[in-house]
Image (cartoon, helix red, strand yellow):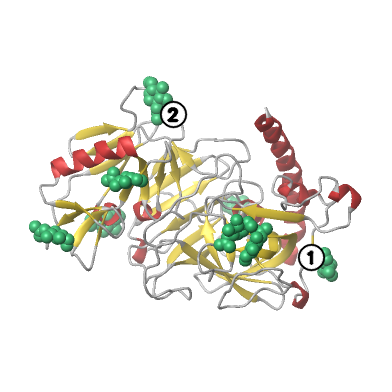
Amino acid sequence: MAMLCRLQKNNYIIAIINLFFFHLMYCSVLATTNINNNNGGFSAHLIRKNSPNSPLYKHKNNKVHRRLMGPNTPGSRMKIDPGSGEHIMKFSMGTPPFDIYAIADTGSDLLWTQCQPCKACYKTNFGVFDPRKSSTYRNITCRASDCRLVALSRPLDYQPNFCRENPKGPCLYRYAYMDTSSSTGALAKETVTLTSTTGKVVTLKDIIFGCGNENNSTITGTEMGVIGLGRGPLSFVSQIAPYVGGKRFSHCLVPDPNIESKIYFGNGSEVLGEGVLTVPLFDEQPGGSNYYVTVPGITIGNDFVPFNSTGTLLTKGNMLVDSGTPMTYLPQEFFDRVVAQLKKTVELESFISPEDSTLCFNSTTVPKFPTVALHFEGGGELPLNETQLFQRNEETKAFCFMMVNTTTEDYGTFGGSLQIDFLIGFDLDTKVVSFKPTNCANFNKS
Ligand SMILES: *[C@@H]1O[C@H](CO)[C@@H](O)[C@H](O)[C@H]1NC(C)=O
Ligand SMILES: *[C@@H]1O[C@H](CO)[C@@H](O)[C@H](O)[C@H]1NC(C)=O
Ligand SMILES: *[C@@H]1O[C@H](CO)[C@@H](O)[C@H](O)[C@H]1NC(C)=O
Ligand SMILES: *[C@@H]1O[C@H](CO)[C@@H](O)[C@H](O)[C@H]1NC(C)=O
Ligand SMILES: *[C@@H]1O[C@H](CO)[C@@H](O)[C@H](O)[C@H]1NC(C)=O
Ligand SMILES: *[C@@H]1O[C@H](CO)[C@@H](O)[C@H](O)[C@H]1NC(C)=O
Ligand SMILES: *[C@@H]1O[C@H](CO)[C@@H](O)[C@H](O)[C@H]1NC(C)=O
Ligand SMILES: CC(=O)N[C@H]1CO[C@H](CO)[C@@H](O)[C@@H]1O
């Protein structure tokens, strides 16, 4: 019941927001002259965290990982990930611009960064954004309709009548992630600028963000915040939609972590042409953040391994598409059958890597792996090759399988490594995800 009320409330908010953005769009077309790449769309670089290219590179592979997911709402869960495959997006905030390195997260909506004056900020190597030094910073008041977007994500000590008593007071938020990371502060608006992959400067005005003056992070905290690319109305993707021609984006992740990947927003981000597989997105809940798809099973060699062994009925939305999670997770029982089938077709000695619990095959040369394809609701089949399925461990020289088990979840997570060398498009308006096999290192969308 509580859930039901919430959904209705969210829908109401979305309606208001749409009107609001329509207005914004109209006003900003004239004001913002410098976004004009592909009919308003633009592209940006994604830096693989822990690639030596990353300003956030930490030498030894740190094992602590989190998946940033929505606030502490039902449906938010955390992932512990071996390896560090998160992606960082660099942009600037404010006038004059201040550089921000934030985790690009398809599992949550809010864009936030640490802000001065800090009550509690974790240590970063790149300073903390100071709104007092920016001429384009705007507070969002309690009374403002935008404030309702965080109505469910308030600080722990928040008084329910705070906004009624302080209509001109700050719009306070608290975003807590399942790994105990959190950001608390005031919702505000700022100008976001970034340099696109074509070298053009893109200016996005009045982007709603969390100015966090009380934050903590489970990692040593070098990243400066999170840029939420989820499906909800607060998401960066939803906010910029009127500027770029629609609520859609795509990315192409390169296999080599030292080469920057690309992300495309709005017009020009469409995944088109031959060999595109388009699958429906499952609506977990209206206004929800996550990209779920339905996967009946996986073909390995000549055999089909069904997701559900106990019946033909399948839970809809049993797989979360999330580039923020490096590995792919399968529920234990499904995982066991996948591994059994894989071992049957790969005739090599295997062992479990003590480092990250992956299943590895000893081989000095590239072994002959079976053909593998992921099946989607509606009959679509996505062929996966070695680039996506296996990674060579430089030390042991073994080939390790990039799918691992989860015992705490009954759904799978389609992680970042499985997304490598696909141009993947997320269309929030038509509610589909599209996949196109692509050599991402050589890829440039025109
Ligand atoms: C924003 O609000 C804070 C207090 O909540 C205030 O100190 C600051 O001056 C305000 N900034 C602007 C630009 O209105
Ligand atoms: C972050 O804050 C929460 C709530 O106070 C706390 O439980 C958690 O331990 C903190 N995490 C870190 C890494 O400080
Ligand atoms: C996006 O592309 C469509 C179709 O080409 C065009 O009508 C629309 O004006 C573009 N949007 C922006 C914001 O430029
Ligand atoms: C598997 O199928 C059974 C019966 O057909 C159904 O009750 C169950 O929810 C399904 N489980 C999943 C994970 O799809
Ligand atoms: C396979 O690799 C593991 C880890 O390096 C090693 O312990 C084992 O001896 C290897 N087995 C063979 C047959 O090479
Ligand atoms: C699966 O997960 C459990 C605990 O999370 C772990 O003990 C087990 O070794 C894992 N690996 C395999 C291959 O099942
Ligand atoms: C896997 O497929 C991608 C996309 O088509 C391609 O770029 C890559 O070279 C392939 N990898 C192998 C090992 O065939
Ligand atoms: C509200 C909240 O999460 N507060 C935490 C902020 O981070 C510090 C440590 O950096 C914690 O002590 C607070 O509890």
Q: Is residue 250 visible?
A: yes
Query: Does any atom of ligand 1 lie closer than 8 Å to the CB of label 1?
Result: yes
In this picture, residue 171 sits left or right of residue 349: right
Residue 375, image quadrant: top left
Residue bearing mark 2? 315
Nearer to the camera, 29 or 135: 135
Secondary element type, mark 2: loop
| Residue 274 in view (yes/no) | no
Residue 95, image x and y in percent?
Answer: 72, 75
Towards the viewer: 304 or 72: 72
Q: Is mark 2 within 8 Å of ligand 4?
A: yes
- Along the line of sight, which residue is nearer the eye, 181 or 301? 181
**What mark, if any, has residue 138 been given in the picture?**
1
**Rendered image: mark on residue 52:** none
Q: Residues within 10 Å of mark 2 (few under 14, many from 20)?
A: some
Give how far across and how far down residue 252 sits, in percent: 41, 58
| Side of 91 relative to 66 (left or right) | right
In which quadrant will I find the N terminus? top right
